[in-house]
Image (cartoon, grey):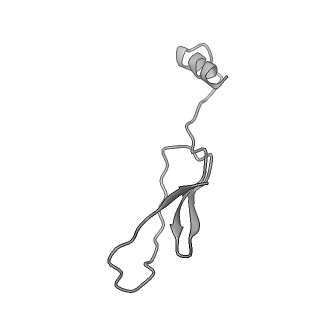
């Protein structure tokens, strides 16, 4: 059904529908202790932007591994 509606919108047959691209799941990164810190909530329209400052786990830490998850 979704493809048929999108086709009708693209051809101009339907003008009463607004289609938006969204993230189907929440997106976040793994923080200390294996916890997922949610950064983008599910159903957020895309493109989007998010910013947050995180600290390293140890002083003078030279590198970090950033694991991105969806839930």
Report x, y in % for residue 36: 58, 65
Q: Residue at x 62, y 18 (%)?
A: 4
Q: Residue at x 64, y 25 (%)?
A: 2
Instruction: Please say whether residue 45 is visible from this viewpoint.
Output: yes
Q: How many marks?
A: 0
Q: Position of residue 14 (x, y in %)?
A: 63, 17
Residue shown at 45% from the left, 77% from the top: 55
> Residue 3's image quarter?
top right
Q: Residue at x 43, y 78 (%)?
A: 56
Residue 43 image point, x, y percent: 62, 45
From this viewpoint, is residue 15 visible? no
Say if 40 sits above or below 7 in the image.
below
Percent across and percent down for residue 39 are: 55, 60
* 10 is higher (above) or lower (below) than 65: above
> Would residue 66 appear left or right of 12 to someone viewing this image?
left
| Image quarter in which the N terminus is found | top right
Pick out the residue farthest to the bottom: 59
Viewer-proximal residue, 37 or 47?
Answer: 37
Tell me: 55 left or right of 34.
Answer: left
For the residue pair 41 and 71, the one nearer the viewer reads as 71
Q: In what quadrant of the picture does the C terminus appear? A: bottom right
Nearer-the-camera pick, 54 or 34? 34
Q: Residue furthest left?
A: 62
Of 6 and 64, nearer the camera is: 64
């Amino acid at each position: 059904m979704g493809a048929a509606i999108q086709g009708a919108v693209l051809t101009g047959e339907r003008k009463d529908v607004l289609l938006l691209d969204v993230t189907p799941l929440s997106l976040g990164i793994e923080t200390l202790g294996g916890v997922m810190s949610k950064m983008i909530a599910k159903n957020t329209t895309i493109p989007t932007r998010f910013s947050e400052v995180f600290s390293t786990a140890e002083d003078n830490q030279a590198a970090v591994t950033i694991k991105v998850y969806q839930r």
